[in-house]
Structure formats: structure tokens, C-alpha cells
Image (cartoon, grey):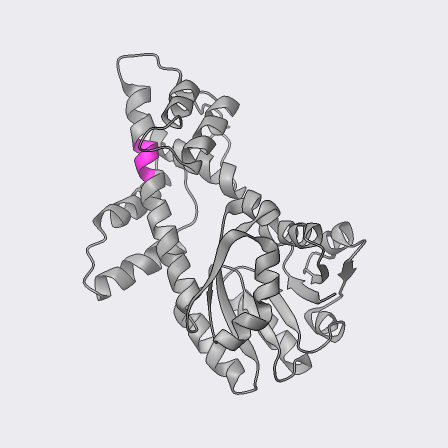
Amino acid sequence: MTRYGIIGLGRMGGNLVRNLRAAGGEAVVFDLNQAAVRDIAGDGVFPASSPADLARQLTPPRIIWIMVPQGEPVDRVLADLEPELSSGDVIIDGGNSFYRDSMRRAGDLAAKGIDFLDCGSSGGLEGARDGLCLMVGGRPEAFALAEPLFRAVARQEGYAHVGPSGAGHFVKMVHNAIEYGMLEAIGEGFELLESGPFRLDLPQVAHLWNQGSVIRSWLMELAVRAFRHDPRLDNITGSVGGGSTGSWAIQEAWEHGVPFTAIANSYMMRLRSRQPDTFAGKVVAALRREFGGHEVQDRK
């Protein structure tokens, strides 16, 4: 049985390990929070005290999945791993890294014979537990080596090699930008329902719209769940976090002459949400909590 390395046991990484175990795979795991390592270690899940220790517990060719925040944390993990890696090993970055950073990392590691796959991961916490949607960039040979892992943790037909290094995170960047626009449209629609002349049952409307309407979707299912928790969203503020992938996508779009009007406006509304409260912001914040476990700001 192939044993994989997984670094980063936060909301997504921890559920990824559980998903892999449910599919019959084994994992060596590391997180800076060693309590998280101890909590998840057990049958088929082996603890590591550092990235280097994790690499030493794997048999070449190693396949190691990194699920840490984009930017400097990824480079730090790679620097810790690199002395222990061998030619033919494969590193997967499953976080929301900027695609140009992924291209740089792939080039740096290729000089040492190590493959780097940039893997956009979508599906939120439920996807991490039950089957992700994965968009993978990198060398086809490295993808083929890691494909059993992707198959184990993705939905059926839920993973694909989309292009060379950087393509996976580029596709995920655009995916997230589209998500911004969809969330904002749902939020604004429910703000009008809330502000209109009728005292509407918002969970009922959200449920109704999922019964064959044109706008039925998983996000609308999450709206039902969010409104059932808090029918008028009185207990949270509308401050919406996130933003890096959306701002990257807007800049890329404008560099390529793509107007990106709906998505750019939805990004601006995220910035607006961090100012005094809006109901649309509350809806978007509640939906992000439902699908990704993202924090919301409770009303004091």
C-alpha cells in the first residue's frame, strides 16, 4: 500500500487525511500544531515531528501533499523538505497559491529532479471529507505517478490534469473569481427579499429555488442551511474575508483585456463589507462559513 505525506492539518488538510483513510490509503502527517498531529494519528496515520521527519518516513518516489497558506509558508515547507528529497519525488501544493509562484517553484525543484504539481482544490470541508474537485498542473509524468492519490480523494470524474506547471492554480484562481460573483449575486438577491414589502420566509424561498429552478445550486443548498441556522442572520456581521485569489484574477483579466466587470464589482463589495454592515455581506459570510468553515464575525 502506498503511503503518502500530508503537511498541514487545518480544516482542509485534516479532512483530506480522513478522506484518504476512508479510501484505504495511509498517510504520514505533520503540522506545526503538534496537537493536531496527535489528534489525527492512529490506524494508518503516522505522526511526524517535522517536514524532514515526514520525508524520511516515506519510500521513494515520495508523494507529499502540502496544504498550508499560500506564500511564504509554502516556501518554508519546501525549504525544510528539500534536503530529504530525491530525484523522482513529487510535491503537490493543494492550497490557493498564485500560479506564477507555482511556476517558479516547479522550475526551482525541476533543477533537482523533483516534480511539483500545483493542485487547485475545490469543494470546501464537505469535499475534503467526501470527494474534492481537483485541477492539477505540472508534468504529465508526475501527474500519472500521483494519480492514484487524486483518484482516492476526488469525486468520480472530479480531478483532471489541466496543463503544465501553474495551470492548476490558474484554473482555481478563475474558479474562485467566478465564486465571488455567484456569492455576491445570491447575497444581493436575498438582501432585496429581506428589504422588500413582504415578510418572506427566506429558508423557504432558498429551498424552493433549489427545486428545479434555473439558479438551483450547491450554494443555494447552503443558503437554506445558513438561513435555517439564523433566519435573519441577526447573529453575525456581513464582513467577508478572503480576497487574494479574486484580486489576482482581476489583475490577470485586465492584463489580458478581459473586462471582468461582475467579478471586479463583487471583489469591491467584499472590501465594502469590511465597512459598516450590509445584509448582502451577511449572506456571503454565512455561505462561506457553510461551505468552507470560514470564520464569521459574531455580532457583539
Query: Can I make out residue 278 in this image?
Result: no
Q: Nearer the viewer, residue 81 or 119?
A: 119
Residue farthest to the right? Answer: 43
Q: Place residue 209 in its image quadrant.
A: top left
Above or below: residue 299 compared with residue 251: above
Q: Position of residue 63 (x, y in %)?
A: 63, 70
The span shown in magenta is 184-188
Q: Position of residue 16 (x, y in %)?
A: 62, 53
Whether residue 239 sits left or right of residue 48 in the image: it is left
| Residue shown at the point (58%, 58%) measured from the top left | 151
Q: Position of residue 158 (x, y in %)?
A: 49, 53
Q: What secondary structure do most residues of the magenta stretch adopt?
A: helix
Q: Position of residue 74 (x, y in %)?
A: 54, 67
Q: Nearer the viewer, residue 140 or 191?
A: 140
Q: Place residue 270 in its image quadrant.
A: top left
| Residue shown at the point (68%, 70%) measured from the top left | 51
